[in-house]
Amino acid sequence: MERGTDIARAAAALAAGGLVAFPTETVYGLGADAAREDAVARIFAAKGRPRAHPLIVHLAPGARLDDWAIDIPDVARRLAAAAWPGPLTIILAKSPRVAAATTGGARTVGLRVPAHPLAQQLLAAFGGGVAAPSANRFGAVSPTTADHVAADLGDRVDYLLDGGACDVGVESTIVDLSRGHPVLLRPGGMPREAIEAIAGPLAGADLAAPAAPGTLASHYAPRARVVAVPAEGLAAAIAAETGRIGVLAPRALEVEPAPDVVVRAVPDDDAGMARELYAALRDLDAAGVDVVIAALPPAAGLGEAVGDRLRRASGPRDPRS
Ligand code: TXA
Ligand code: MG
């Protein structure tokens, strides 16, 4: 795998039907030409991801929604104007130019204009839509540094665009605007409050909707078992565990030192916690802990996404992961 900051090389790899890992403000993506079935098929193979799970199409600033979607409601235009570039993915009825493999056969497509300068330069140089899931093996924790990507995918990637650590740290918020009323499919880097100020109240995801990767209980999970508890319950949860224990908690929470307890402190504010969440889970895995006990933040702002990921990481595991 080649790694660096060469936009022209990365864009050429995409044009040749290859795979390019690239930084976004949320997490690193594993990109391929969204219009090419063969290129998109390589993403699913590299990730070990089931083909029915749809990919987000990333667009350069200034791209036209009408080139990628049809039946676009006014609220989608208002949200896109306010949130892009940024950590928001909008689901709309797809235009025929989006490859069927990209949407896993669905009639809708997820669209997003990322804010990271390297992502924007890559998209501008390539000139088309780039289908990209998070650049990790299926079911694992998303990568927020180039080293994370190299550790997870290594030679499965043709070019790794190195942009350092991601700013937001959790994936984009996903809002479905294809159903007549806005539905929050995944809390993420754009807080619910900011979206609701523009789009009105967001409905919760319909449990009858087809399963997507972000909705699987075992998703976003490190190797260690995860227990997510409110901050007040942290000490009791630590006392109840045996073996090597990792603690993921805001700095302000004092954790009693003990021989078998490894503490990975994260910033106290919701944005700081989101930024370091996945690196902290990877650090604790690397420290060889059996269990991670994580303090749940208040559900406001980015705390909703952090709590969502911690709860999913603590859910029942798929035997494959
Ligand atoms: O921040 C992000 O969103 C990152 C960066 C790379 O942009 N991408 C990302 O992609 O997290 P991925 O594939 O790991 O998660 C995308 C989620 C999946 O749960 C997928 O099912 C959902 O978006 N999704 C994509 N297209 C969809 C569609 N047409 N309908 C419903 N869900 C969709
Ligand atoms: Mg993912």
Image (spheres, rainbow, N blue to C red):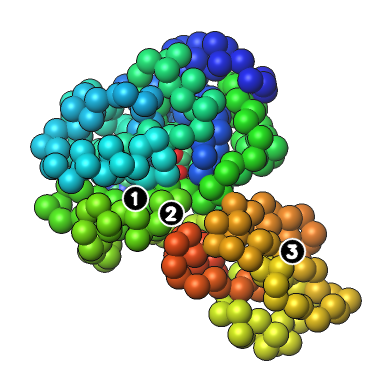
Which residue is denoted by mark 3 in the rendering?
264
Which residue is denoted by mark 1 in the rendering?
174
State the residue in front, 3 or 76. 76
Left or right, residue 253 beside residue 173: right
Using the numbered discs, state the Cα–Cα distance from disc 2 to disc 1 in whole angstroms: 7 Å
Q: Secondary structure at mark 2?
A: loop
Using the numbered discs, state the Cα–Cα distance from disc 2 to disc 3 in whole angstroms: 22 Å
State the residue in front, 34 or 233. 233
Amino acid type indicated by mark 2: Gly
Q: Residues within 10 Å of mark 2 (few under 14, many from 20)?
A: many
Which residue is denoted by mark 2 in the rendering?
188
Amino acid type indicated by mark 3: Arg
Q: How many marks?
A: 3
Amino acid type indicated by mark 1: Ile
What residue is drawn where x is 47% and y is 17%? 14
Left or right, residue 320 beside residue 3: left
Q: Residues within 10 Å of mark 3 (few under 14, many from 20)?
A: many
Q: Quadrant of the N terminus?
A: top right
Rendering quarter of residue 80: top left
What residue is drawn where x is 23% and y is 30%? 65
Instruction: Decide if ligand 1 comes within 8 Å of the CB at mark 2.
Output: yes
Q: Residues within 10 Å of mark 1 (few under 14, many from 20)?
A: many
What residue is drawn where x is 59% and y is 41%? 166
Q: Quadrant of the C terminus?
A: bottom right
